[in-house]
Image (spheres, rainbow, N blue to C red):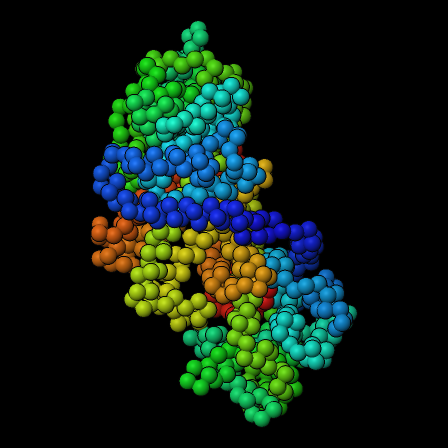
Amino acid sequence: MIDFELSPEIAAMRDQLHMLAEHAMRPIAREYDEREHEKPWDFINMMWQLSKSSGIGPGAAKDGKDKAPERDRNLRTVVAVEELSWGDAGLYLSIPGPGLGGAAVMAVGTPDQKQRFLSRFKDDKPVWSAMAITEPGAGSDSAAIQTTAVRDGDHWVLNGTKIFCTSGLMAGDATKSNGFVVVWATIDRSAGRAGIKSFIVDAGTPGMTVAKCEDKLGIRASDTATLIFEDCRVPLDNILGSPEVPKTSEGFKGVMATFDATRPIVAASAIGVGRAALDFVRDELKKQGVEIRYGVGPRKLTAIERDFMDMETQLQAARLLTWRAAWMMDQGQKNNLEASMAKAKAGLVVTQVTQKAVEMLGPLGYSRELLLEKWMRDAKINDIFEGTQQINMMIIARRILGYSSKELS
Amino acid sequence: MINFELDEEQKLIRETVIGFARDEIRPYAREADEKGAVPASLLQRGWELGLVQGIIPEEYGGSGSEHSALTGAVIAEELAYGDLAIAMHLLAPRLLTVPLVEFASSALKRSLLPAFCGDVFEAGTAAVMEPRFDFDSSAPATVLRRDGDEYVVSGAKCYVPLGSQAKHIVVLAGLANGDGTVHPQAVVVARDTPGLRVGGREKSMGLKALETTSLELDACRVPRDHVLAAGDERAMRRLADLWHVGLGAMAVGVARAAYDYAREYAKERRAFGQAIAQKQAIAFMLAEMAMEVDAMRLLVWEAAWKLDRHEDATREAYLSKRYASDMVLRIADNALQVLGGHGYIRDHLVELFLRNARGFATLEGLAIA
């Protein structure tokens, strides 16, 4: 039966996280935007303690023993991520925890791998994990990656360069945390996508170097690292999934399936940023005595009212698409199409909403005294990472048309 | 608790209506548009689905299902997917029966509802819009005033579906607040009331199969209990919300019809050695349509769901109708574009979808959830 109301548990968690976003994130949002490459350690440590004690938030342990019920995990996560991103998207991304690397281990890891890599998220000190896919010559076309993994006795030997790795510094540098990086590499270049496998590389493994952290337009509190692999040796059983090269690209599809879980999360983060801007505009308009008149004849609306209504409706459309994608995953339904819809819509919408918000508030919007201009900068990444808007539109198109990637590229 | 799935009864109703729209409505869409009329046999078969009788309480002869805006939205979308004008014709009686079921006194229900539980199609309607560019359903210019034990209605209306056929009409009028402003009030007016004059059939760019007329009310006197939920502003907001959801849902249906048509065409039509759907320029348009159809529907359903919980849904209903009106036009226009020159030709239905889609931003009160 159709129901758009969050369960009392999720609503309570959301309210709790909202307090946290307002009181622990907003006050330092500007500071860590200006001080790029410095880490908000007080905030990080607080979030680490909080995620361990309460089990709330996306940092909650994903070792199968956490308190959050499984049946609504994805929905809980998107609601939590929206709230934290309302506080600050960069700070949200800097929160330690299983993250994308952990999600991959959780999804396809063996019991032994889960034990070895996920139990550390119960440690006293914060732990990060990261996912390294993008390369200088391969972004959206992740099947074209050049990083190689070659078997040598008891080890896989990795060689290549990974860029744009979110939290790559915190996950890969052993002086930062006891983390790990999940690295995509090919074990057989002639096999194309079928040859692509992912490997878990422990922080500080010899041969893995964090070469640099990018200077970015936004989400500056979060590091975006370049990782270089030079004869980096990892144990044989650090491969995720089978070491065989399948005849078909089914294996690659399995790897890509991780995105079905992560894209709604990125969409939710986008919506959090968009809502931050919308809430701010609403408050400012109220101060100026501007009332948004719902129900009035359409030809009587002012330009401001029309803009504001467009923004809030677009945002709500993106939120409903996102909740649906997460809910479907919780139900065990395939959500590849819906996850891409959520991501494409949310990325586009918040980019537009935050840009409009800057415009609507004029000099206030453009000023670094306020956070609007920052939200506009932060919002844009959601239109890009975890699959650009265009890649997601491509996936939607293939699904609705029944085309393979060969038939539509 | 969040759930994106219709319940079993709604699924069953939807399946039935999908079949009817596919087998009965769509094949007549073009002919009905060209001839400006819905075939009587089609109306009769539509009537037999029980979509009007279903929500009328058993004591008045109906099937007594509880009125649900969400179920209404599902029905409206699926019928409109078949054809908008035919859908509006089939559901026009609900423009009268839904406000009666929700807001009328039992005496009024007893006198009017049984007529809608018979074996043949019975017309009913609402006169909401007014012939002015800045028409505002929250402050209608049609005047309602109290005179002793009766009320008097005066004003001009337009876009009244089945205006010459319906025996009773829900008229939206403004009752003075005393400070120069008015609040909207729905009042049931019999067509044979002295002073009421049904105008000629209107000619529109779309909805050609649907008879709409203008209406003039010159000091029409109505009994007191024909004013629905008098003084209850919440009830009148709810009525406007139900209109918005009804039209929003129909916009989803038209948008989906245009999208499906364009998608199937694009898979068949070949250019430069491949299907045009294999070109990104076309594929991305189709992907956007698919995404927006879902977005529209979710927004409309959210508003309907709130109405079914009897919560204030004015914002959701208004915004979802607004969004759906914008989006259906964009989708129908893009669908026509996918067909190129063929889309402009009346051999294909997309030009009809586009003409029908254009109306949503303007129309109010032609459908109800």
Please give left or right for residue A97 compared with residue B158 in the image: left
Image quarter for residue A383?
A: top left
Please give left or right for residue B322 compared with residue B3 in the image: left
Q: Nearer the viewer, residue B344 or B284?
A: B284
Residue at screen point 37% across, 65% down: A305
Q: Nearer the viewer, residue B123 or B54?
A: B54
Residue A322 appears in the picture as rendered: yes
Residue at screen point 65% across, 86% down: B192
Q: How many marks?
A: 0
Residue at screen point 29% across, 34% down: A41
Position in image of residue A354 (x %, y %): 33, 51
Please give left or right for residue A218 compared with residue B76 in the image: left
Residue A392 appears in the picture as rendered: no
Image quarter for residue B367?
A: bottom right
Q: Is residue A239 above or below residue A327?
A: above
Which residue is the extreme one toward the top?
A: A153
Please give left or right for residue A59 compared with residue A206 in the image: right
Q: Is residue B89 above or below residue B77?
A: below
Position in image of residue A56 (x %, y %): 45, 39
